Amino acid sequence: HADTLGAMVAQVTDKPLVRYMRAPGRGGWHALTPRFLSSARRSAMAVYYALELHEQLDVPIGIVEAAVGGSNIDNWQPTRGGKAGCHVAHMKDLFPYALRGVFWYQGETNIYLGETDVYAEKQRLLYDSWRTAFENDALRFYYVQIAPFARGKLANGFDYDAEFPNFLVAQAQLAKTEPNAEMTVINDLGNLRDIHPNEKLLVAKRTALHALKRDYGRTDIENRSPAPRAVTVRGACVRIEFDHAKSLYVYRRNAA
């Protein structure tokens, strides 16, 4: 658990009805117990997400982790140019396992490769390939916006910081065009000096809101982050109106 709560959660979590499996699944299912959580590295977001659903729904929850650090989205394509991506081997034994949906968090490598202009297309292809492989046309695809990180210019002259906001725009496209997709906004949770920010619990809770509302009948939930709807300028005053912002307020931490 690479976050500030992981060690504590690992010591006190004993949930026999929340099961965790590492793809390709040959190790089987494991209940979330202190022994299991402390025995090796586990995905903090996967654990928090499963625990949140279990707490809210009071039903058994199973979650499968398939993760490779620093990977390219191409490596997770079941088919691309007639060949499967190398990391999809982690998942091939799961096809066509009856998953309700997937939780996708990736993108930094594709910024480094200068692929902002094609990332939206690649993400679309990934989703379409996965719902075919899982034989589920309604497969939910809940994905996480990458967090802010100040990398500056690379040795080859590529300006990561300048490209970052353009990449966020590219990431947002799938949720605008695919009814089964939602994006979890986390641009307020990053650490500019750490590409792996610590707020994994909040990332998981925000993503769980999508599932609770769209898959488990909690229609009372607001699962989308505030989004600008209109901007008007009057003299030196700029007025911004937001959708999905019923309880939004400005917190001025250092205000007098």
Image (cartoon, rainbow, N blue to C red):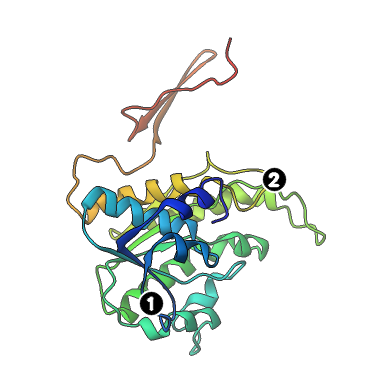
The answer to whether residue 75 is above or below residue 118 is below
Dividing the image into 4 quarters, which one contains the N terminus? bottom right
Q: Residue at x 22, y 56 (%)?
A: 215
Coordinates of residue 187 in the picture (x, y in percent):
53, 42
* Picture layout, residue 36 above or below residue 143: below
- State which quadrant residue 79 falls in: bottom left
Residue topped by disc 2: 193
Residue 102 shows in the view = yes
| Quadrant occupied by the C terminus | top right
Q: Point out residue 201 in the picture as x, y percentages from the top left corner.
A: 45, 47
x, y percentage for residue 55? 28, 49
Q: Give the amino acid type for the residue marked by disc 1 in the picture.
A: Ser
Q: Quadrant of residue 71?
A: bottom right
Query: Circle 2 — which element?
Result: loop
Camera-nearest residue between 130 and 168: 130
Give, as a three-letter code, the residue at label 2. Arg
Q: Which mark is residue 129?
A: 1
Q: Is residue 149 left or right of residue 239?
A: right
Q: Residues within 10 Å of mark 1 (few under 14, many from 20)?
A: some
Foreground label between 2 and 1 = 2
Which residue lies most toward the top here? 256
At numbered mark 1, what does the secondary structure look like: helix, strand or loop?
A: helix
Relative to 2, is 9 on the left or the right? left
Which badge, 2 or 1, is on the more N-terminal residue?
1
